[in-house]
Amino acid sequence: MKTTFLDGAGLRGALIMSAEYVQRHRADLNRINVFPVPDGDTGTNLALTVSSIADHLRRSTDSSVGVVAREAANAGIMGARGNCGMILSHFLLGFADAIGDRARLRVSDFGQVLRSATEHVYKALEKPVEGTMITIMRAIADEAERLQHSDFIVLFERLLVKAREALASTPELLPALKARGVVDAGAKGFVHILEGISGYLSGDPLTALDQTPTYDAEPAVFAAAEADFGGEEQFRFCTEALVRGKGLPTQDEARAWLRERGDSLVVIRSGDLLKVHIHTDEPDEVFGYLRGFGELASHKAEDMQAQHAVAERARAGHMTLARRPISVVTDTACDLPDEIVRGHGMHLVPLNLIFENQVLRDRLDMSPEQFVVELKKGAHPSTSQPAPAAFMDGFRRATEEGENVVAVLLSSALSGTYASAQAALKQMGGSADVPVHLFDSKGGSLLQGLLALKASELGELGWEPARILAELERVRAQSGFFIVLDTFERALASGRVGRGKAWLGSLLDIKPVLDIDAAGKLLPIDRVRGRKNALPRMLEILEKKVPRGVKKLRFGVMHVGAPEVLEPVTREIRARYGNVDVVHAPGTPIIGTHAGEGAWGIAYLVED
């Protein structure tokens, strides 16, 4: 059956399938990654980028190809990791711009759309390098314009032939590849994306896997590459940041400022989003510049010398190449936004949400927004900790990417989650490929989340696990989280308050304030009458807990169906403590189950 047009459903399914292909080949792409630096992370970065796109599209229902293309581009920008993820996001942005508001895309228009997307990438890059992903993009654009077939299935079969030919030629275009006997990892990843799309359109998603040619991908190819590391890479930190704001600089303006501070520069500007990737020696200077334009939604600085040291140790032990010193696991009670989780490559283990006889994975099977809708309908779910098997799966995924694993988990005084993780390690015994270190956050929501973020940042700087755990203990001792409830309903359901107190509190419009203490227990510390009095009282509590003059700190503000609190709370925090980072997040369904609709809380992390 001929496929003469592509609608929103078709594009969505094709992109989701392409993400599966990249995931399957992630380890192989990591092994052959030698350009621009041999840090063994291209497969991971591309997999995280396409996963962000696929996860967003799975929640999409629009039938317009233009709308789906725009959603994919925006999700790519939000989740882009590394050079390859940034270039792919640029391609999708150009693709969406070329499609515009069309409901369906004809085969006869596809070549022009690919050409526009490819030209967008070339114009956006500071220094386009042939022999990489962009070479494949140009090759398929040329072929699509030449063929003009009336059938998308046949067209993609021909595009795949051309893409594989272009991939095989990449060593001739890039001496670094030829010297190591490999094709470019990013280019090969883009071919896998095309394979997934072709497999979806043909209705036979496994065909392309069997057809994929194999190349020399042995870890030995890194021997020569690593010897050149110090000479080829001038800068130390692989730095990425995502900024939201109304007064963002243009793409060219940002690039002009940044190019003086590093290389491997890729900048994407779309609407109120600005995404930056740069190799630099001054990541804090980059972050400071970007903070001047809006909210720094996520940022990271990964020490490439630490990655290099991990690679050397892996080779010396004849092990699969590990991508980073530390891989972080946390559970879904952390409330961290997706862009932070993906930006740092964290692994989430979901708690369980129970609706009558249906068990859903927190955050994965039900989003915070969907959960609030269910609360408004009168739903009364319950919760349970992850099974040990869920942690075993999370730990195994993390060990594929890190030399060590650090797990930052929900307070053992609030949940059996920590005990479940301990049981998982006991069941794994000596089967874990790398050591797994557990940390009891003695917290939940964004207190736990900020500690997990801290662990990721320290790991990216090359800290050893024992040193990370000690620093988390120190920081946790001077940090905290407190929350104001808008209703007694969920506290009553959980048994935290009696029916009489709940009735009287509701009658008098009393809002209880709860605090997680140093032992990780949730205790009432105050109450306020009326919703309008909640913010002033919460700020008074915050000032008692965090006196002004603290130099190094950051905050988190979470809510359950109350996004209107984010702006005024953030404004008041910055009026007191300066232009500090403030993470915003809707409370995950697990947190919302116990806090109830309208609740909101403040987490603070003191790092002095």
Image (cartoon, rainbow, N blue to C red):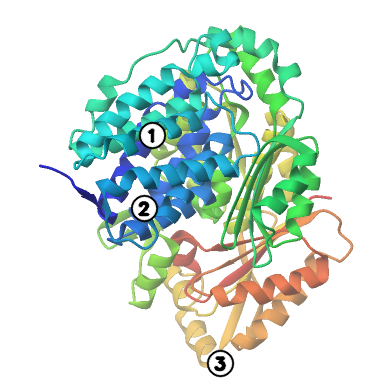
Rendering coords of residue 202 (x, y %): 19, 36
Residue 320 seen in the figure: no
- Considering only vertical position in the picture, is 197 above or below 76? above
Q: Of the residues shown, which amino acid type is indicated by label 1?
A: Asp
Q: Which residue is mark 2?
A: 57
> Of circles 3 and 1, which is in front?
1
Residue furthest toward the bottom? Answer: 508
Rendering coords of residue 436 (x, y %): 56, 29
Labelled pair 1, 2 in contact (Cβ < 8 Å): no
The numbered mark, 3 or 2, whose residue comes first in the sequence reads 2
Density class for disc 2 (Cα within 10 Å; few <14, some 14-19, many ≥20) is: many
- Considering only vertical position in the picture, is 342 above or below 493? above
At numbered mark 1, what does the secondary structure look like: helix, strand or loop? Answer: helix
Tell me the residue at 47%/72% (across/down). Answer: 596
Tell me the quadrant of the picture where the N terminus can be found: top left
Q: Which residue is mark 1?
A: 142
Residue furthest toward the left? Answer: 1
Rendering coords of residue 285 (x, y %): 81, 46
Judged left or right of residue 151, residue 283 is right
The numbered mark, 1 or 2, whose residue comes first in the sequence reads 2
Gap between marks 3 and 1, in whole Å?
71 Å
At numbered mark 2, what does the secondary structure look like: helix, strand or loop? Answer: helix
Tell me the residue at 23%/33% (across/down). Answer: 205
The numbered mark, 3 or 1, whose residue comes first in the sequence reads 1
Q: Which residue is mark 3?
A: 508
Quarter-wise, where is residue 307 in the image?
Answer: top right
Tell me the residue at 52%/23% (across/down). Answer: 131
Q: Of the residues shown, which amino acid type is indicated by label 3?
A: Leu
Gap between marks 3 and 2, in whole Å?
45 Å
* Mark number, residue 537: none
Q: How many marks?
A: 3
